[in-house]
Image (spheres, rainbow, N blue to C red):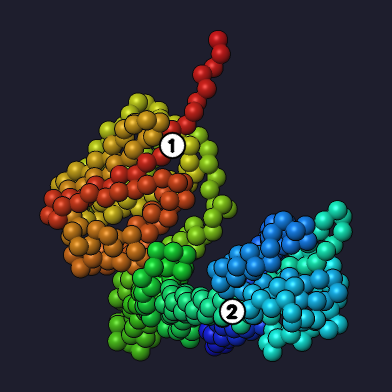
């Protein structure tokens, strides 16, 4: 069907031309000839009636002479380019503008029948064999005292009407040709504006169907076809990006699983074959345990991300005191902070501050942000956690004085498994999933998280939560 669509339009164009030509050549000539004949007959009948009521009637009332009427009708005949006859009911010619007046010569039209017009005032033919060609014959009765004394007959050649008809048909043919050319322009316009873009879109879908999601095309149009092409391009780019992310995801997770598994395998083989002496087994078993904990943490993070992608099933929103959650999370890092000589400074709004969110998920956000801050902070530095309220929103800030994030890495830190070059040496136990989890949790709450960082100065993460609407107890 796709390959015959354009042929269908070409076929429709050809059929339009053929039927137009058939209609013009079949129906229009007869309709035009009939219309011109009727109009000419009407005009001649008006003249014939006028003659019958004036000049011709005077002949039968002896009010005028035959010579006078002949002279007047000759002039009128010349003007009308037609023959004018006056005939008796019996068919005897009284006057003929085509021949000189001769009263002694008797001309009788054989088989003359005034009813031959079949109730009409005109007919087309040779008028009872009087002409060698078709003539338009118009008859008007000459009456007096309710009696028909004769007839005024006006003859005009049908060749003149045919000539006028052919002139009008020529105009019709020219009009048909112009319409045909205009339709050709419309077909060309359709080809350029609809068919060509449609072919591009069809070819693009074939490329995408074959797996080539990186194929790009462009349709220069601002209508629905252009919008469809843009949407298709965007869809393909998103799918391509998703495939690239998936490949990157698999590569990263393979790398992060391979490293601890290689370490575990190497240490266990070394202990089994005696490379590591018995007295050092405890030390290397602890290393193996640490690597298994790293794998467990990585697995749990992946499960967390997978669950977070399931919308509408995970959040258990309640009203809780965010200040208490911040204090408890900070207290859980007391041992780690003591080892690095770090201080956590809390600047909280009020003694209690209630928000509406999933307490467990927000606690995980705080834990991940604080864990990152501790990892990348210098010894003997301060980590500040601060809250503030703006228009029914609570903003939580976690700020450190560590190594900072390079400017080119700021847009990439939310990607799964991403680790900047500056952090790889310090975060060897990290999974690269912490900030991805944070982003997913905050987004699932319909809120936002931003980062402000200067390399060598420090980093600040700020996220928002909706304040809870706590009703005051009635006295």
Q: Residues within 10 Å of mark 1 (few under 14, many from 20)?
A: some
At x 32%, y 74%, the residue is 284
28 to 67, vertically: above or below: below
Q: CA distance from mark 1 to mark 2?
A: 94 Å
At x 14%, y 56%, the residue is 455
Q: Which residue is mark 1?
A: 466
- Indicate the quadrant containing the N terminus: top left, top right, bottom left or bottom right: bottom right
Q: How many marks?
A: 2
| Residue 401 seen by the camera | yes
Q: Which residue is mark 2?
A: 160
Which sits in the foreground, 18 or 440?
18
Residue 134 percent across, percent down from the top left: 69, 84
At x 50%, y 34%, the residue is 319
Residue 15 percent across, percent down from the top left: 60, 84
Residue 135 percent across, percent down from the top left: 69, 80
* Residue lying furthest left: 456
Which sits in the foreground, 281 or 382?
382
Q: Earlier in the sequence, mark 1 or mark 2?
A: 2
- Indicate the quadrant containing the C terminus: top left, top right, bottom left or bottom right: top right
| Drawn side of residue 167 relative to residue 277, left or right | right
| Drawn side of residue 215 relative to residue 7, left or right | left
Q: Are marks 1 and 2 in contact (CB under 8 Å)?
A: no
* Residue lying furthest top: 475
| Drawn side of residue 1 relative to residue 451, left or right | right
Residue 51: quadrant of the picture: bottom right
Q: Secondary structure at mark 1?
A: strand
Q: Secondary structure at mark 2?
A: helix
Q: Residues within 10 Å of mark 2 (few under 14, many from 20)?
A: few
Label ID, residue 273: none
At x 47%, y 65%, the residue is 224
Judged by depth in the image, the label closer to the viewer, 1 or 2, is: 2
Residue 109 percent across, percent down from the top left: 80, 81
């Amino acid at each position: 069907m796709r390959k015959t669509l354009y042929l269908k339009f070409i076929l429709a164009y050809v059929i339009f031309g053929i039927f137009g030509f058939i209609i013009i050549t079949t129906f229009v000539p007869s309709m035009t000839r009939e219309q011109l004949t009727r109009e000419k007959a009407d005009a001649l009948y008006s003249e014939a009636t006028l003659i019958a009521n004036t000049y011709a009637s005077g002949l039968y009332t002896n009010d005028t002479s035959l010579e006078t009427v002949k002279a007047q009708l000759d002039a009128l005949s010349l003007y009308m380019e037609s023959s004018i006859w006056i005939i008796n009911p019996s068919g005897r010619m009284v006057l003929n503008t085509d021949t000189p007046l001769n009263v002694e010569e008797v001309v009788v039209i054989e088989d003359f029948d005034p009813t031959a017009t079949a109730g009409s005032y005109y007919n087309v033919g040779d008028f009872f064999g009087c002409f060698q060609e078709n003539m338009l014959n118009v008859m008007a009765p000459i009456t007096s005292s309710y009696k028909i004394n004769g007839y005024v007959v006006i003859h005009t050649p049908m060749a003149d009407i045919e000539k006028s008809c052919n002139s009008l048909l020529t105009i019709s043919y020219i009009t048909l040709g112009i319409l045909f050319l205009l339709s050709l322009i419309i077909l060309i316009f359709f080809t350029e504006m609809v068919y060509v873009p449609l072919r591009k879109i069809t070819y693009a879908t074939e490329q995408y169907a074959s797996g080539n999601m990186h194929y790009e095309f462009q349709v220069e149009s601002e209508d629905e076809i252009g919008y469809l092409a843009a949407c298709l391009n965007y869809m393909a780019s998103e799918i391509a990006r998703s495939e690239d992310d998936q490949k990157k995801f698999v590569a990263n997770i393979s790398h992060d699983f391979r490293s601890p598994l290689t370490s575990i395998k190497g240490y266990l083989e070394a202990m089994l074959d005696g490379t590591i002496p018995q007295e050092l087994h405890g030390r290397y078993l602890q290393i193996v345990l640490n690597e298994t904990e790293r794998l467990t943490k990585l697995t749990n993070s992946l499960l967390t991300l997978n669950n977070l992608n399931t919308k509408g099933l995970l959040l258990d929103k309640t009203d809780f005191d965010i200040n208490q959650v911040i204090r408890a999370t900070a207290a859980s890092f007391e041992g780690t902070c003591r080892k690095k000589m770090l201080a956590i400074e809390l600047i909280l709004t009020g003694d209690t501050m209630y928000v509406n969110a999933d307490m467990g998920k927000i606690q995980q956000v705080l834990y991940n942000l604080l864990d990152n801050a501790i990892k990348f902070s210098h010894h003997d530095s301060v980590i500040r956690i601060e809250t503030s309220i703006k228009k029914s929103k609570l903003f939580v800030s976690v700020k450190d004085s560590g190594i900072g994030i390079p400017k080119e890495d700021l847009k990439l830190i939310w990607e799964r498994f991403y680790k900047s070059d500056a952090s790889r040496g310090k975060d060897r136990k990290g999974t690269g999933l912490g900030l991805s989890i944070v982003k997913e949790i905050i987004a699932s709450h319909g809120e936002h998280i931003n980062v402000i960082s200067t390399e060598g100065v420090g980093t600040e993460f700020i996220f928002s939560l909706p304040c809870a609407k706590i009703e005051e107890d009635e006295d």
